[in-house]
Amino acid sequence: MRKLFLLIFSILFSAIELMAQNTNDTSVMASNGKIYVVLAVCLTIFAGIVIYLIRIDRKVSRLEKKND
Amino acid sequence: MKKSWWKILAVVLLLYTFIAGFLIQVPNIGNLNQTIRNLFFHVPMWFGQMILLLVSMIFSIRYLRSGNLADDIVAREYARIGITYGVLGLITGAIWASYTWGEPWSNDPKQIAVAIALLIYLAYFVLRNSMPDMDKRARVSSVYNIFAYFIYVPLIMVLPRLVQSLHPGGQGVEGNPALGGQDLDPTMRLVFWPAVIGWTLLGVWMTTLLIRISKLKEKNWIHA
């Protein structure tokens, strides 16, 4: 489950990275008023929150199994 | 991860919301400029809150019919996350207002009504915690919760539309033009509705976690 999310996020970020590498100075990250930087920050925060939620979810599941 | 397809859906929809919400072309309306993108983050807080509180009310009705304390726990936790979304909506609204209405709090009818609505829901928790007897607490607070929803909807939806308000939907808007129905750009609509579903599902996910933890903690009292 977690691996799946990590996979999704790593694909996402490597895609952004790749696009950035293909163009040198006018990279994607720096284009459009550097909006992509904000996007990367927000996605990182969101990824952190989701991973945290998943960990809590699994912890609760384990507790429930132990309590049955 | 119990039955997790909708949790994955929530994450995917929100990823889409962030990416598309930041990158699509948006129409230039009034003095909003780029802040119109807040539509994908501020507005879903309120949509999500309405849905979460509706579920809370439904479970309060279920409790009154069944007398099962588990239903009351569900109602309580949905109200909790609903209020959290409401507070986030109020704060994000104030941030947005600082740059479009000129100040974070302009005593706009929408802001005042929403603040009252939130206080009504906070009183729900004050009421709950004031009663040590569990069955009595569940029964009284369920009745209150149903009442609260039916005063909450007119407060945030109806009243601000009847008077002059800076918020879209109000009468004689001098600030921003209303952004309802036809005014919503078709591409923005393609991001807006997935955003609403995504944020709501995320709220449901957090709520189910709280419910499961509460049920673990209060296992001995639930007879079901």
Image (cartoon, helix red, strand yellow):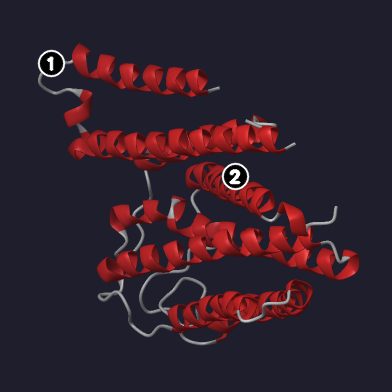
- Left or right side of B33 for B84: right
- Mark 1 neighbour class, 10 Å CA radius: few under 14, some 14 to 19, many 20 or more: few
Q: Give me the disc on residue A24.
A: 1
Q: Work out whether residue A36 or residue B34 is closer to the camera in this orientation and state it.
A: A36
State the image quarter where residue B173 is shown: bottom left
Residue ranking furthest to the left: A25
- Asked if residue A62 shows in the view, the reply is yes
Quarter in which the N terminus of chain B is drawn: top right
The spot of residue B151 in percent (x, y) is 66, 81
Q: Give the residue at x 57% y 63%.
A: B80
Q: Give the residue at x 60% y 35%.
A: B7
Q: Give the residue at x 53% y 48%.
A: B199
State the image quarter where residue B48 is shown: bottom right
- Left or right side of B68 for B195: left
Q: Give me the disc on residue B205.
A: 2
In space, the residues marked 2 and 1 are separated at their CA atoms by 42 Å
User: Of tags 2 and 1, which is closer to the observer?
Assistant: 2
